Image (cartoon, helix red, strand yellow):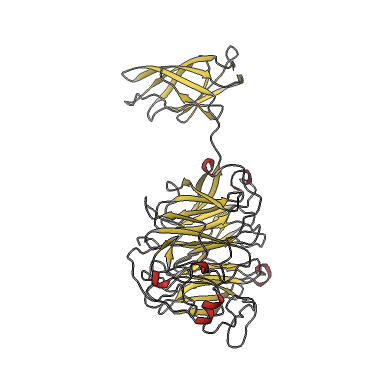
């Protein structure tokens, strides 16, 4: 199956209606975006690079993943067709699913299927998981509770979603307040055809907040009494945030409980929103606007009612849909990426970092492209310890996300002259110390071209590992003073490719390749 972007591009216009008392209630200026915790990384965003490494394969269109805090260090990964797989860093990806509800899941649309998973706050004891999926027969967006002990499935809430199969949302997360938050898209199609984003009488185009620990009246859940639209005539009281198009992924910052929402755009912009802890009732603007640009003026309330996104990026350069991630709070890369919100674009595989700028605002930048290892990323999650993992839609793998800081300033320069003939080549190399400190115990590494083999070397002690050659200083030149040079060379055979090395590393730092 060919994966399609989560964004649809052709615009439509439609009218909206909002209950009058809800509009009056929201007439006050919107709260400002949340301020991030003071703890931030020392490395500027422009010097931060996100990388990914595949750790497992064989997933079938994974849609989300979560790390239960049960002492097992495992990840639970949902697959589109209705299964959940288990990954453990010591034993890898389990072949058999730990649960299978494919008999009730409708996966027929590209954005349909089993979409979200959240362990109950008491998961260690209860063994209960909450699942979000599109249900047979007509694709209703569904929230259900699943018991691992007895394979029981209890449907808690459904929202009809029959006309279009896209914009289902599906992310579910327990917030720091113990309530379950659930994102539902605007009903699909294009251009908000149901005017759902600005309406409060529908669950479409919303993030909900539910108390699933109890039932109230005919409901299989309760509405928290401090939800922003409790008692508002004509409004669905489950609503926490509105004015969203397809908030495919959102997350809470474990440091301060603030809410980060990545909303997939129409055809112009992708956006990232940041709401303060407890900031209910925020109107994020769809379909009055897309990002910061007006989209449908007929849908626009008073501008003071809207909460601005903190970062947008255009749907150009291969971008198609933002996949929201998390604020990095792990220990391994805290000095590089601590306090940085990380998201990725589904189509371009560009990684974006956003963080507080220290002046009450935010800065954002592209911090890498993981397309060589992780194309079509569909979800990002954190381990219990705050490290980041991602799954990609096709071909279905699990990846660890890591970070690198700026490359060390070059303190060496290399010049090379070579002679080639028949099946051989010789190269003379001069290494110059361009730094201010002596280079003692140096080692110079470079790679030979495919089909080349080191025969001998001079001026240094040579070792090989595969195609990598390492030349280390000998007693007569083990220290290179600032401004001084060491000379060495090698003889190699080749099978037709007589090209010479173009990248040199001295003591794990890159050298500048100078003209001979």
**Going by the image, does 199 lie left or right of 337?**
left
Residue 225: give x, y in percent of width and height: 64, 79
Q: Give the quadrant of the C terminus.
A: top left
- In this view, the residue farthest toward the bottom is 217
| 106, 282: nearer the viewer | 282
Instruction: Please report the residue visible at 32 percent of the width from the left and 65 percent of the height from the top.
Output: 10
| 34, 417: nearer the viewer | 34
Residue 130: give x, y in percent of width and height: 57, 72
Instruction: Please report the residue visible at 36 percent of the width from the left and 19 percent of the height from the top.
Output: 424
Tell me if residue 27 comes above or below residue 5 in the rendering: below
Number of on-image labels: 0
Q: Would residue 273 be seen by someone viewing this image from the given angle?
A: yes
Q: Give the quadrant of the N terminus.
A: bottom left
Instruction: Please report the residue visible at 41 percent of the width from the left and 80 percent of the height from the top.
Output: 137
Residue 390: give x, y in percent of width and height: 51, 55
**Going by the image, does 69 lie left or right of 159?**
right
| 505, 101: nearer the viewer | 505
């Amino acid at each position: 199956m060919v994966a399609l972007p989560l964004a649809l591009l052709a615009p439509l216009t439609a009218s909206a209606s909002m209950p009058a008392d809800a509009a009056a209630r929201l007439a006050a200026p919107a709260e400002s975006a949340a301020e991030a915790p003071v703890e931030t990384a020392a490395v500027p965003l422009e010097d931060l690079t996100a990388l990914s490494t595949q750790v497992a394969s064989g997933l079938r269109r994974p849609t989300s993943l979560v790390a239960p805090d049960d002492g097992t260090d495992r990840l639970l990964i949902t697959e589109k067709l209705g299964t959940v797989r288990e990954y453990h860093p010591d034993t890898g990806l389990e072949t058999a699913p730990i649960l299978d509800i494919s008999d009730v899941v409708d996966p027929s649309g590209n954005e349909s299927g089993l979409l979200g998973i959240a362990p109950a706050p008491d998961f260690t004891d209860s063994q209960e998981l909450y699942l979000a999926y599109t249900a047979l027969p007509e694709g209703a967006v569904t929230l259900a509770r699943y018991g691992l002990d007895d394979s029981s499935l209890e449907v808690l809430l459904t929202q009809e979603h029959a006309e279009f199969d896209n914009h289902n949302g599906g992310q579910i997360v327990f917030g720091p307040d113990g309530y379950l938050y659930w994102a539902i898209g605007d009903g699909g199609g294009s251009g908000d055809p149901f005017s759902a984003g600005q309406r409060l009488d529908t669950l479409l185009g919303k993030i909900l907040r539910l108390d699933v620990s109890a039932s109230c009246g005919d409901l299989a859940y309760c509405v928290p009494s401090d939800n922003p639209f409790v008692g508002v005539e004509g409004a669905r009281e489950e609503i926490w945030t509105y004015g969203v198009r397809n908030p495919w992924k959102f997350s809470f910052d474990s440091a301060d409980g603030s809410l980060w929402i990545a909303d997939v755009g129409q055809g112009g912009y992708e956006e990232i929103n940041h709401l303060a802890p407890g900031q209910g009732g925020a109107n994020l603007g769809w379909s009055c606007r897309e990002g910061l640009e007006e989209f449908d003026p007929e849908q626009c309330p008073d501008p003071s009612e809207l909460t601005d996104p903190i970062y947008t990026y255009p749907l150009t350069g291969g971008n198609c849909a933002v996949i929201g991630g998390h604020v990095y709070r792990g220990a391994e890369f805290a000095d590089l990426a601590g306090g940085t919100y990380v998201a990725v674009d589904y189509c371009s595989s560009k990684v974006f970092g956003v963080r507080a700028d220290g002046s009450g605002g935010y800065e954002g930048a592209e911090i890498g492209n993981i397309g060589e290892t992780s194309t079509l990323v569909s979800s990002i999650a954190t381990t219990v310890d705050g490290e980041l993992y991602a799954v990609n839609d096709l071909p279905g793998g699990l990846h660890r996300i890591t970070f690198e800081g700026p490359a060390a300033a070059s303190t060496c320069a290399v010049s090379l002259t070579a002679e080639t003939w028949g099946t051989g080549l010789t190269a003379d190399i001069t290494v110059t110390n361009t730094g201010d400190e002596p280079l003692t115990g140096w080692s110079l590494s470079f790679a030979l071209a495919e089909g080349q083999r080191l025969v001998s070397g001079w001026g240094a002690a040579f070792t090989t590992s595969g195609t990598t050659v390492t030349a280390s200083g000998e007693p007569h030149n083990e220290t290179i003073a600032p401004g001084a040079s060491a000379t060495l060379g090698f003889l190699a055979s080749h099978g037709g490719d007589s090209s010479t090395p173009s990248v040199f590393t001295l003591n794990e730092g890159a050298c500048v390749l100078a003209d001979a």
